[in-house]
Amino acid sequence: MKHLIPAAIAAILLAPAASAATFTGTWGVSGSALADPGLVVRTSAPGGFSFDLADGQTTSFDLFRIWTDEGDVGADDTAPRALDVAFDLGSASGTLGGTTRGHGGFFQWGSVDWSAPLLLDVGSGVLSIALQNATFNGGVLGLWDGAKHGADVSASFSYAERAPAPVPLPAGFGLIALGMGALGLASRRRQPA
């Protein structure tokens, strides 16, 4: 037994470290929020991304900028409008939905709220993508229009590897263990007291 403990510790310490997976993809924006009627929003140009994540890791960065060129929130601007962000990683793709709307009154602003995170099956595990809600172009008795008064939409990517499949034990393993236990008991009885 004394010899097994150092061997087990060595096996744990020498086990290979988790390797990082590389994620490369593109994103694009679509939806009814990009045209009248309603608060018309603009976003920075679609783009790409590339990063490495190991199991259990998360990375976040600004994905795009959102703004409106409208000068105030009219009656039609308060209705919710769809804004979708499509992600394509080559082997996996999906769309994360959001809703934009204008908020009128003395203080005025636009907002975007995103649905639950998008979960993509990337073969070796699951990549979760979440977008941060944002408010943009806030002003007094109107909107401060243009991209400089807009907001950055941040994306968080989290990766979780699949657990390896369990290794099945041989069919006779139980009988072998029982036999070894019986041999151990028999050898204990033969030792002098």
Image (spheres, rainbow, N blue to C red):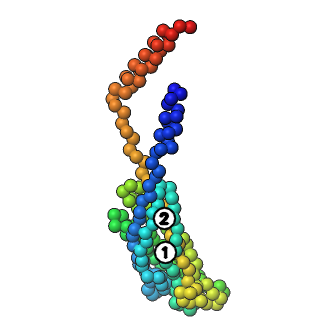
Q: Which residue is mark 1?
A: 63
Question: What residue appears at the point 41 percent right and 24 percent down from the top-left corner?
Answer: 177
Q: Position of residue 16 (x, y in %)?
A: 45, 48
Asked if the residue under mark 2 is in contact with the one under mark 1, i.e. CB atoms within 8 Å, the reply is no
Counting every numbered tag in the picture gives 2
Note whether residue 34 is visible: yes
Amino acid under disc 2: Phe
Above or below, comparing residue 49 to residue 39 in the picture:
above
**Label 2 Cα neighbours within 10 Å, binned few <14 / some 14-19 / many ≥20:** many
Residue 87 x %, y %: 40, 70
Q: Decide if residue 38 is in sight here.
A: no
For the point 34% across and 67% down, the residue is 90
**Badge 1: residue crowd in 10 Å (few <14, some 14–19, many ≥20):** some
- Considering the image in quadrants, where does the C terminus appear? top right
Residue sticking out furthest to the bottom: 71
Which residue does the image show at 34% across and 31% down from the upper left? 170
Residue type at mark 1: give it: Leu
Q: Is residue 164 left or right of residue 133?
A: left
Q: Nearer the viewer, residue 85 or 47?
A: 47
Q: Residue at x 43, y 69 (%)?
A: 50
C-alpha span from label 1 to label 2: 11 Å
Is label 2 in a helix, a strand or a loop? strand
Q: Secondary structure at mark 1?
A: strand
Residue 47 placed where, x, y %?
42, 77
Q: Which residue is mark 2?
A: 157
- Front in this rendered view, residue 9 or 141: 9
Q: Nearer the viewer, residue 149 or 6?
A: 6
Query: What numbered label is drawn on residue 75?
Result: none
- First along the sequence among labels 1 and 2: 1
